[in-house]
Image: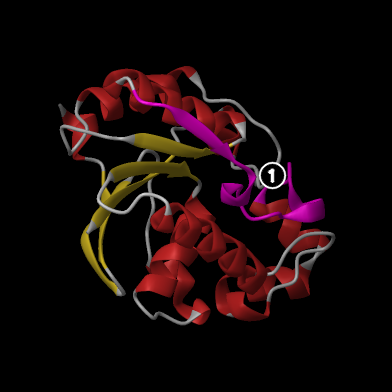
Amino acid sequence: MMKMILVRHGQTEWNLLGKYQGQSDTALSEKGRQQAELLAKNFPVDHVDAVYASDLKRAFETGEKIAGRFGCPIIPEKGLREFHFGEWEGHTYEEIVKKWPEEAANFFGAPEKLQTPGGETFSILQERAMKTINRIREINEGKIVCVAAHGAIIKTILASLMHIPLHYLWAIRQDNTAVNILRFDDDYVSIELINSTEHLRK
């Protein structure tokens, strides 16, 4: 048995501006740092053996707060990077709809068909995500690990584990510093918690 606590990073300035971040290396806002500190202080388990984090600043800094709380190592993982939005990065949804109306229609209406200009597809993202998650699982049997990543990639991980088609990806909500707890027993997985932000109320 092993447990994985999957967390989304805190708020960034681009979140506030409504800009798509993707693999742009944006940092946490002041509020995002406060959220990450509250997450670490009120973490849902009392022990973590290791933290694996996307190497993008906003997720890595969130992971650092958790690793600091438990005095455990933090390992950067390029495979945990956010969905690559390509030319959409740095634009708002309104700007994207104007410039790429056909692709934008697929973003929410048929995400399984979406091909962002110069970026990834959600199936490619999900394949990358699960390859990374399965590798982390294999080397951490019997342990409790935290994975600090991003909204879209976490959605694809949860969709895969719950056998939800990518068409329904947006039915899975992930707020800033959302906590998800996964339990793995050999080939079986159970989802114990999804999108909890209870730590922000304490």
Q: Which residue matches tag 1?
A: 23
Magenta residues, start to end: 72-92
Q: Name the quarter where the C terminus is drawn.
A: top left
Q: Classify residue 146 by image quadrant.
A: top left
Residue at x 73%, y 63% (from the top left corner): 120
Q: Pointer 1: residues within 10 angstroms few (<14), some, or many (20+)? A: some
Which of the two residues, 167 or 142, is positioned nearer the viewer here?
Answer: 142
Mark 1 residue type: Gln
Residue 1 position within the rendered picture, expressed as x and y whole percent measured from the top left: 22, 59
Which of the two residues, 92 or 82, is positioned nearer the viewer here?
Answer: 82
Q: Evaluate whether residue 67 shows in this view.
A: yes
Which of the two residues, 189 or 195, is positioned nearer the viewer here?
Answer: 189
Q: Does the magenta stretch include residue 89?
A: yes
Q: In this view, does 137 lie to the left or right of 180?
A: right
Q: How is the image coloured?
A: secondary structure
Q: Is residue 18 left or right of residue 4?
A: right
Residue 62 position within the rendered picture, expressed as x and y whole percent measured from the top left: 44, 29
